[in-house]
Amino acid sequence: MNFFSRIFAGLLLVLSVATYAADDQAAAQLRKQLDAMNTLQGDFVQTTYDKSGVEQEASSGNFMLMRPGKFYWKTLEPMQQLLVSNNKTIWLYDPDLETVNERAFTDDLRETPALLLSSDIAQLRKSFTVTRDEKDTSAEKYTLTPKVTEGMFQHLTLVFKANQLTEFAIQDSLGQLTRCVLTNVQRNKTLPEEKFFFIPPEGVEILKD
């Protein structure tokens, strides 16, 4: 499964944050934002940059998230691709290649940082150092840095405006940055459960990790 598949599988760990007594102000503020999200849907533009800041590729599409651990991430441009999770299995469907990559859902935050959208905040603090950029008054910007450096990324940034998640970015261990800007975002709307289960089309090759 490609780099972004693991990233977004991770980004779910933020969607099911549980209640706990926080002694860290930044983690408590982030917990408050995440606790307010049971579902999320909208459009995205994803851009990847190399370590020098040069744009490598860009894509766009739409998404749905549901706590805990469910997501539907559909890339429309420049090539179609579909990433789906039902909190037990993750599917990555490439219609051009006629392949489906299938893997078990994991709760290892170091390997799937997107699981942040569905993780207990205590687990967040166990795995990450959480800081907030107090200088930026136009948004709430949180940076999560892994406490164990053997994972696949250096840090994850979440940006909220008017209490809405509007952007996230992940920098990998090689310095590559993947930035995702969210638009037309709606939260806590009823979403169709069938979107979070994928049945491979007849004739496609199924590859299991």
Image: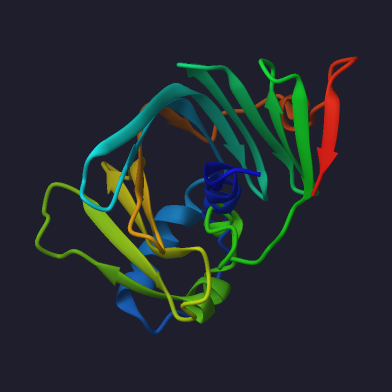
Judge left or right: residue 209 versus residue 140: right
Judge left or right: residue 147 versus residue 82: left
Q: Nearer the viewer, residue 67 or 47?
A: 47
Which residue: 66% across, 15% down? 96
Q: Position of residue 57 (x, y in %)?
A: 36, 30
Q: Quadrant of residue 65?
A: top right
Q: 24 above or below 52? A: below
Q: Please, which colouring scheme is shown?
A: rainbow
Q: 180 above or below 45? A: below
Which residue: 41% across, 64% down? 173
Q: Nearer the viewer, residue 107 or 149?
A: 149
On the question of residue 182 being in view, the answer is: no
Q: Position of residue 145 (x, y in %)?
A: 38, 71
Which residue: 40% across, 54% down? 33
Judge left or right: residue 62 versus residue 165: right
Q: Position of residue 78 (x, y in %)?
A: 45, 16
Quarter holding the N terminus is top right
Q: Nearer the viewer, residue 178 or 121?
A: 178
Q: Position of residue 34 (x, y in %)?
A: 46, 54
Judge left or right: residue 186 versus residue 47: right
Q: Residue furthest right?
A: 202
Q: 57 above or below 124? A: above
